[in-house]
Image: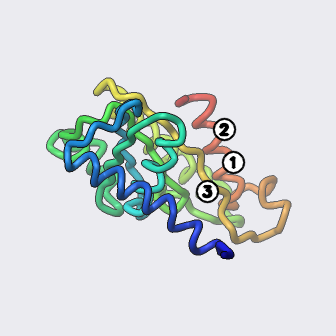
Amino acid sequence: RTVTGVQTCALPISVGRTLARLRNDGVDRSPLEPLALAILSNATTDYLGDVIAATGARYGFDATVGTFPYGQVALQALDPQSALQRSESPLLLLAVDHRGLPLVEDVGDSARASAALAEAKDHLKTLTTARRRDGRTLILQTLATPSHRVFGSLDVRQAGTLRRQTTELNRFLVDELA
């Protein structure tokens, strides 16, 4: 029988759901070690839980993944009454992309783009500082490069482009926040 990509993509989801069902039924899952991860993102991440659980099992972990409503990064990170604050996950993945930051693509006005970049850095610093106070291990995801380009491969060199700004933000994440 031939296995297609669609069928193999469904396997981690099936494994993840099976692990969740076993957990809910109180079945012993040893030798898997329990691991709880919370994901805070400006994107929809609900579909990642089963895949991360299946991947965790490959490496010896019984992973549970908590996700939070779309577009509530600042609320969940900063509000002491938020669902994130009430969760028990010792690990937090902060996965924000360029659309969740106050960036402005303005090649003609580098001062405006620089001000937006500074605001985005402040925003990330605020989020990470708040999350580090609660003792969780914070995992910072670097920003993916935006797919559209103004000047092709020169975007990374041109002030005001999203590619240049995300490159600078990634450097900031590694050098200043990691």
Q: How many labels does the image show?
A: 3
Q: Which residue lies furthest to the left in this view?
A: 81
| Marks 2 and 3 close (CB-CB < 8 Å) | no
Quadrant position of the N terminus in the picture: bottom right
- 2 or 3: mark nearer the eye: 2
Q: What residue type is labelled 3?
A: Ala
Q: Distance between the residues labelled 2 and 3?
A: 17 Å
Q: Which amino acid does label 2 sit on?
A: Arg
| Marks 2 and 1 close (CB-CB < 8 Å) | yes
Residue at image coords 45%, 62%: 13
Q: Label 2 belongs to which residue?
A: 171
Element type where label 2 sits in the image: helix
Q: What residue type is labelled 1?
A: Thr
Apparent side of residue 136 relative to residue 102 in the rendered image (left or right):
left
Provide residue 139's location: percent of width, then percent of height.
48, 36
Residue at image coords 36%, 56%: 18
The quarter of the picture where residue 133 lies is: top left
* Earlier residue among tags 1 and 3: 3
**Local crowd size for mark 1, using a 10 Å CA cut-off: few (<14), some (14–19), many (≥20):** some
* Earlier residue among tags 2 and 3: 3
The quarter of the picture where residue 61 lies is: top left
Mark identifier at residue 167: 1
**Local crowd size for mark 3, using a 10 Å CA cut-off: few (<14), some (14–19), many (≥20):** many
- 1 or 3: mark nearer the eye: 1
Provide residue 77's location: percent of width, then percent of height.
30, 43
Residue at image coords 41%, 35%: 128
Q: Label 3 belongs to which residue?
A: 113
According to the image, what is the colour scheme of the structure? rainbow
